Amino acid sequence: MIEIAGLTHRYNNKMLAVHDINISIAEGEFVSIIGPSGCGKTTILNILAGLVVIDQNQGTVSIGGQPPRAGRRDIAYMLARDSLFPWLTALQNAEFGTEARGEPADTRREKAIALLHAVGLKGFETKLPKALSHGMRQRVALARTFCLDSQLLLMDEPFGALDAQTKLQLEGVLMQLWAATQRSVIFITHDLAEAVALSDRVLVMSARPGRLVANVRIDLKRPRQINELQRDPAYHELYAELWSQLETGMAMSSGDAE
């Protein structure tokens, strides 16, 4: 699904954001990326989404055998903020992406209603964002993302600003939706527990300029019950390994790759 080889990117030909990144992601794989703030995690997502253009002399990136470009229908991007239109209802926001892509009204509405129910918002279809809590707005954003028939989901800390209980609930919802569709996911997070709970693999990046320092496979059985993982010793071993790798990455000098 995704091949990134030798990717190095500078902003304005000055600030080195990521250095010599090599990533392969299979179809249907759920991969999280963790690393210190400013290490280039979001830069990688923006490159994949075609929002940041790379110099072809600084590596190659392909998605399904094609180079990135903005507006690809096989990619959906969920941001940390819900980015809902305040004048649209929850249902209208959930179906906005499919409407923009020209799906028939009855088809997109049926899909949006089903997904709003799946994320726990049955009865809130006609509410405006101002009437919804932060967590409920993120549920709408999650429904909007899954409404798109995109095989690759880019998710940039979508639950990072939520309280612990709401985050756990939405992680469980995400797992259910992903299990039903088996899309490829790249998930950015600062939460090591979240990375272990959700992922097939976790990629660990160093301090800026971001370099990959570890590729950790999460060998926990699926389906996973988020609340029950705390009882699994393997979960805690993986958490400790990620923390150790993250400490190594954070200690790396930012000047090594200049």
Image (cartoon, rainbow, N blue to C red):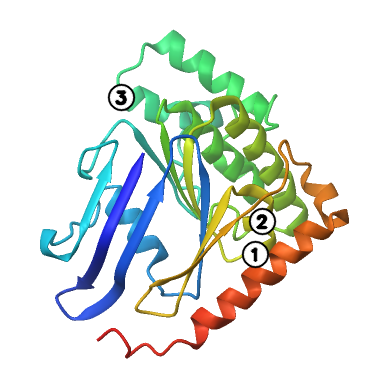
Q: Residues within 10 Å of mark 3 (few under 14, many from 20)?
A: few
Give the Cα distance between marks 3 and 1. 35 Å
Give the Cα distance between marks 1 and 2. 6 Å
Measured as percent of width and height from the top left, residue 111 is found at 52, 18
**Residue 99 sits in which quadrant?**
top left
Res. 192 mark: 1
Q: Name the residue rendered at 40%, 90% in the picture.
A: 253
Secondary element at tag 2? helix
Residue type beneath disc 3: Arg
Q: Name the residue rendered at 62%, 39% in the picture.
A: 174
Image position of 208 with respect to 110: above or below: below
Residue type beneath disc 2: Val
Residue type beneath disc 1: Leu
For disc 2, the marked residue is 196
Q: Residues within 10 Å of mark 2 (few under 14, many from 20)?
A: many
Q: Is residue 125 visible?
A: no
Q: Quadrant of the C terminus?
A: bottom left
Image position of 242 with respect to 116: above or below: below
Image position of 24 with respect to 11: above or below: above
Measured as percent of width and height from the top left, residue 230 is found at 84, 56
- Residue 114 left/right relative to 43: right
The answer to whether mark 1 and mark 2 are in CB contact below 8 A is yes
Q: Earlier in the sequence, mark 3 or mark 2?
A: 3
Q: Residues within 10 Å of mark 1 (few under 14, many from 20)?
A: some
Measured as percent of width and height from the top left, residue 221 is found at 73, 41
Res. 101 mark: 3
Secondary element at tag 3? loop
Give the Cα distance between marks 3 and 2. 34 Å
Q: Nearer the viewer, mark 3 or mark 1?
A: 1
Q: Nearer the viewer, residue 200 or 162?
A: 200
